[in-house]
Amino acid sequence: MRVLVLGADGYLGWATSMYFSIRGYEVMGVDNYFRRGAAEELDCTALVSSPDLDRRAAIWKGASGRDIHVRIGDVTDYPFIRGVFEEFMPESVIHYAEQPSAVYSMMDREKAALTVRNNLLSTLNIIYGVNEVVPDCHIVKLGTMGEYGTPDIDIEEGWIEIEHNGRRDRFLFPRQASSLYHTTKIQDTDMLWFYVRTWGLRVTDLMQGPVYGIQTDESVLDPRLMPNFHYDEIFGTVLNRFVVQGVAGYPLTVYGNGNQVRGYLNLKDTMQCVYLSVTRPAERGELRVFNQMTETFSVNELAERVRDVGDRMGYRVEIQKIENPRVEKEDHYYNPRYTGLLDLGLKPHYLTDEVLEGMFEMVEKYRDRINIDAIFRGIRWR
């Protein structure tokens, strides 16, 4: 099978490219290096410096004997991405090619506009490229659990049955995002659902929780193959950030009272989830939604886990509660359903002390690259 990975230079995109390649798939990776450029501009580069995609593909070839084809270009440029579809004729396209940060989207009007333009236009171009060139191609789009917000009812897996005035129907579960980034992801879903109904596309939408982890089974072949591990306020996810803060001796930044609960998963499980989605595709005219997570934790629980493991390893980890720069509920109900991927065969890697110890050990190797100034800047929603 030919698998096209859009956003292949990113934290998830590069790991996904290797995951499919080692399993015998023909893989093409596309990126425009947006996040590299933004991280350089904002002085928040990844913990581990990684070669560009062409060089990484060459290193991968040497380590694995397998090819990953690379094309550099912008998915918002329709002639470019249509040309990629015509050249590669993918059977599945994995869409990571979006501005991925809630914080970035809330920094100023310019970054908000870039987020809207990039995320919605890239999704629209993929829809048109598939429909015009490879209409049977399966689109796998990375959504986010943040689309749902924190409603005071159970969060179903994408869809909800509603009875009103004696009649019943099935709708996409109501969304109520907490950032502009998450709002564009809702709009992606709505756009895909429109074209699924109109053109009979086949789409899987993965509502992913925050991801943690610094290595995959493929990246251990060569340290230069490691994912782009960010720990800063703008592009880093909470558990990755906490581990780096623990190593650096920087108090763990818990926003507000720390009772915010979210669904999390290991980087290795993201690979499994995407693989299962590709190998068991949606039907024609189907928008299939999976909630992609394996465990729920509050921010306080994560901070305490990191502190306890760090203390045992000889780090002096402190927890500091600070005024919440975001606009979000801190005390709320949170009970999402996430059985779909488990039913397909997902075998979760749960957050154990051993997993945290491994993260501490890996971050320690690159301790001299930690930029303390990038950890927290207090970017506010208001």
Image (tube, rainbow, N blue to C red):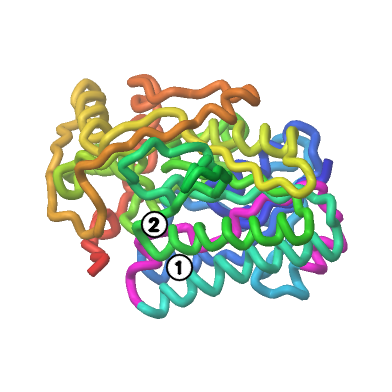
Specify whether 22 is left or right of 232.
Answer: right
Specify whether 285 is left or right of 8.
Answer: right
Position of residue 326 relative to residue 140, above or below, is below
Residue 76 in the image: x percent, y percent?
65, 72
Q: Quadrant of the N terminus?
A: top right
Residue 139 in the image: x percent, y percent?
71, 50
Q: Is residue 292 magenta?
A: no
Residue at (25, 43) in percent of width and height:
245
Q: Which mark is residue 38?
A: 1
Q: Is residue 84 magenta?
A: yes
Q: Which mark is residue 162?
A: none
Q: Quadrant of residue 88?
A: bottom right
| Contact check, label 1 and label 2, Cβ < 8 Å | no
Position of residue 248 relative to residue 24, above or below, is below
Query: What residue span does the magenta drawing correspond to?
Result: 82-108
Residue indicated by mark 2: 177
User: Of residues 132 and 92, which is closer to you in this image?
Assistant: 132
Q: Which residue type carries mark 2?
A: Ala
Q: Does residue 253 appear in the picture of this structure? A: no
Of the two numbered discs 1 and 2 in the rendering, the one whose residue sits closer to the viewer = 2
Residue at (61, 56) in percent of width and height:
7
Residue at (75, 34) in percent of width and height:
279
Q: Does residue 366 appear in the picture of this structure? A: yes
Specify whether 242 is left or right of 317.
Answer: right
Badge 2, how many Cα within 10 Å: few under 14, some, many 20+? many
SS of the residue under disc 2: loop
Badge 1, how many Cα within 10 Å: few under 14, some, many 20+? some
